[in-house]
Image (cartoon, rainbow, N blue to C red):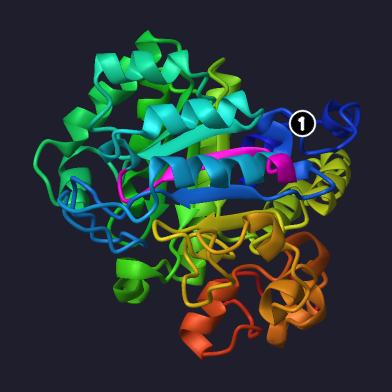
Amino acid sequence: MIGISKLYCGQVETSDFLRYGRHSGSLPSHLLQFSEDKKPVVVWNMTRRCNLKCVHCYAHAEKLEGEDPISTEQAKTMIDDLAAYGAPVMLFSGGEPLVRKDLVELACHATQKGMRAVISTNGTLITKEKAKELKQVGLSYVGISLDGLEEVHDHFRGVQGAFAKALQGIANCQAEGLKVGLRFTMNKRNVAEIPGIFRLLRDLEVPRACFYHLVYSGRGSAMIEEDLSHSETRAVLDLIMDETRKLFEAGHPKEILTVDNHADGPYVWLRLAREDPKRAEEVLQLLQYNEGNNSGRGFACISWDGKVHADQFWREHVFGNVLERPFSQIWDDPNIELLHKLKNKKAYVGGRCAKCQYLKICGGNFRARAEAVYGDVWAEDPACYLTDAEIGL
């Protein structure tokens, strides 16, 4: 994650997190990206079932019918291990996590074990009663996915009325005092909706939004041609920075992040170097603490069937299964070659990435995209939009 508001609008200074010691167990959620120990934030796709039919679903979600391979008790055992290992955050995702009747019970178990629990949802199933339950268990955050305003969103989600139900879910969370934010995956079909998303943030008083770059995974693999070109991506980053600044200067500051393309970090720094050189110096230090992409190190995924992956998009590689072996043992096993290399991937990346002057603050970007396009885990990320001159070639 690249905190646009934190970096570009100066909402975070190095002193803000240094006083916590940069340990993931003590850092507030909004500063976790700057942790030093990089204990993994764990996404658990707790079900493959979903009530919508999203065209870009990385999980290849299925219909509501069926059983989930991991039982409630098995899930609690898994959470116990994660908590003891020091994983700071458990992100419950899917499919649609709210189709599992034990979501509230399991989120409560995670918070009781000292973890921060968050959910990633389409928002359509968050009734007033469900919002109240989620608040009572101490949920830290609810991320609700939108793909644009009503017409575009409903088209992406494959269900008429999905947008209206998602907005009602937002309102129900707000009524209970739950922190709620938006998640938006950028592509050619919906990039024109971004100004509308910023208007929603202001009008609905939503404090946070994450703008995701497209990753070629799941049903999203068929959308490679829908990904933004390099020039389009640069224009979108400038737009996001401009819109973030407008809200900030109008007295409506929001937490705005971009996700899944760590070229965004150097791009923000390059713009600040032109506009505010003094702030740019501090941003460079913040980016060095961030370290860029952390799939396989500071980020992990557990699938609905217990398989462990480097992140939720990259399911081609399985490191083990929590139904057979605790996550903590899998994650630290030096004999799992790819997982071991990912923890120091800067030593293995090739192409432009290997020669890039920003490798230390980008981390080689997304290996899943490199493999999807070039068939090589260690190839350069094809979605890097920085020019040869900008990266020092």
Residue at 87 percent across and 28 percent down: it is 20
Quadrant in which the C terminus is drawn: bottom right
Residue at 88 percent across and 46 percent down: it is 281
Q: Position of residue 98 (x, y in %)?
A: 30, 36
Q: Position of residue 187 (x, y in %)?
A: 36, 60
Label 1 SS: loop
Q: Is residue 87 magenta?
A: yes
- Work out whether 125 lies above or below 57: above
Residue kind at label 1, given as amino acid type = Leu
User: Is disc 1 surrounded by few (<14), some (14 to 19) or many (20+) residues within 10 Å?
Assistant: many
Seen from the viewer's position, the closer of residues 59 and 79 is 79
Residue for badge 1: 27
Residue at 42 percent across and 66 percent down: it is 228
Asked whether, in this view, residue 21 is left or right of residue 157, the answer is: right
- Work out whether 45 lies above or below 386: above
- Work out whether 32 lies above or below 58: above
Asked whether, in this view, residue 45 is left or right of residue 369, the answer is: left
Residue at 79 percent across and 66 percent down: it is 358
Locate residue 189: give its quadrant: bottom left
Residue pushed farthest left?
160
Decide if residue 388 is in sight here.
no
- Work out whether 278 lies above or below 392: above
Seen from the viewer's position, the closer of residues 277 and 321 is 321
Residue pushed farthest bottom?
375
Q: Position of residue 11 (x, y in %)?
A: 71, 28
Q: Is residue 167 magenta?
A: no
Number of marks in picture = 1
Q: Which residues are magenta?
A: 84-96
Asked whether, in this view, residue 55 is left or right of residue 80, the answer is: left
